Image (cartoon, rainbow, N blue to C red):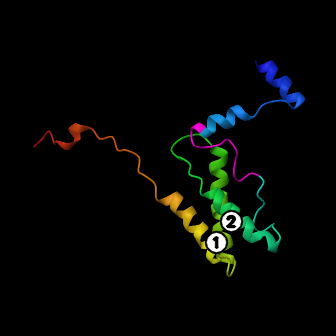
Amino acid sequence: AAKADAGAAKNGTASKAAPADAGKKRGLSDDNPFAGLPTLREAPAGERAALFQKKLLACSRVYDFNQQDHIKDKESKRQTLLEIVEYVNNTRNCFSEGMMQDVVSMVSANIFRTLPPVHKNPNALFDAEE
C-alpha cells in the first residue's frame, strides 16, 4: 500500500481526503490555519485589516496543550498571538466596530471553556489521623 501511495503521490493522484476526514471526526482538520498568512508587518497597509481578521479567526481555533499533537499548529498560534499583541500595541485605531466582534469571539473561544474533570481519590477526603 505504501508503494501505491508513493506512486500516486508522484503522479499527483494521491487522495488527501482520508487524513482530513479523520481530523474532522475529532473536530479538527489537518490544515494549519496559519499556513500561508504573511506577518502583519510584511503586509501592505491596505491589506492589514483583512489579514488581522484572518489571524483572529485562526487564533479562535482551540487546541489542547496537554496533548502532544498538532505541535506545529500550536507554535504557529502562539507566534500569531504574540504578533497580534505587538500589532495592537503599535497601531492606532486598529479596531473597527466589526473587528471588535472578532476580537471578542477569539478571546471567548480561548478563555471560556469547560474545565477538564478532576479525578480525586475518594480516600483523600478523610484524614487517617483524625
Instruction: Residue at 74%, 65% (x, y): give it.
Output: 51
Q: Vertically, is 98 above or below 32?
A: below
The first of marks 2 and 1 along the sequence is: 2
User: Residue at label 1?
Assistant: 99
Q: In which quarter of the image is the N terminus?
A: top right
Estimate the x, y position of residue 75 in percent, counting from the top left.
65, 51
Q: Nearer the viewer, residue 6 or 104?
A: 104
Give SS at disc 1: helix
Magenta stretch in the rendered image: 25-35
Q: What element carries label 2?
A: helix
Q: Where is residue 28 in the image (x, y as percent from the top left)?
A: 61, 43
Q: Is 101 displayed left or right of 34 in the figure?
A: left
**What type is the residue that disc 1 sits on?**
Met
- Residue lying at 87% horizontally and 32% vertically, measured from the top left: 12
- 58 relative to 119 in the view: left or right: right
Question: Quadrant of residue 104 in the image?
Answer: bottom right
> Could you tell me if the residues under marks 2 and 1 are in contact, i.e. CB atoms within 8 Å?
yes
